[in-house]
Amino acid sequence: MYLCTFLDEKPLSMDYKKQYTAAELTELKAWFAAHKDQLPATLQLDEATFVPDVARAVAQLEEIANLHYANPTFSGQIYLLFKIRQKIED
């Protein structure tokens, strides 16, 4: 499910999925590349998840996504990238 604004069709959040498409990952990687200098040093993602080094976490999660995006076993790690982006955008 996408939550969209009324003025444009940009997704505001990405729900967990068992598998993500190459197009979704390409868009996500492009977003992180464009905002690389704007990443916070640390991030409290939610009540239970603290990211002590955001740049390093994003790099490692992107590597997992590149290698295993078609494997549903790794969809949780890919979902974390979407959650990090959403938290930064908020």
Image (tube, grey):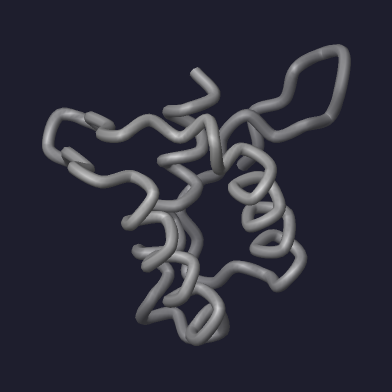
Q: Is residue 85 left or right of residue 29?
A: left
- Rendered location of residue 29, percent (x, y): 63, 57
- Toward the left, the furthest residue is 48
Please state the horizontal and vertical placement of residue 82, each as a whole percent of the image: 50, 47
Report the label total.
0
Q: Is residue 89 above or below residue 84?
A: above
The residue at the point 17 percent across, 38 percent down is 50
Image location (x, y in percent) of residue 58:
42, 55
Image coordinates of residue 90 in percent, x first then y, are: 49, 18
Q: Would you identify the image quadrant in which residue 35 lies?
A: top right
Residue at 64 percent of width and 50 percent of height:
33
Image vertical order of residue 80 relative to residue 23, above or below? above
**Residue furthest out toward the top:** 6
Left or right of 46 on screen, residue 40: right
Q: Is residue 12 above or below residue 30?
A: above
Q: Residue furthest right?
A: 7
The residue at the point 50 percent across, 61 percent down is: 17
- Quadrant position of residue 54: top left
Q: Nearer the viewer, residue 60 or 4?
A: 60
Residue appearing at x 51%, y 38% in the figure: 85
The quadrant in which residue 25 appears is bottom right
Quadrant in which the N terminus is drawn: top right
| Depth check, front residue: 20 or 40 | 40
**Residue farthest along the front direction in this orientation:** 37
- Horizontal side of 20 relative to 67 (left or right) equals right
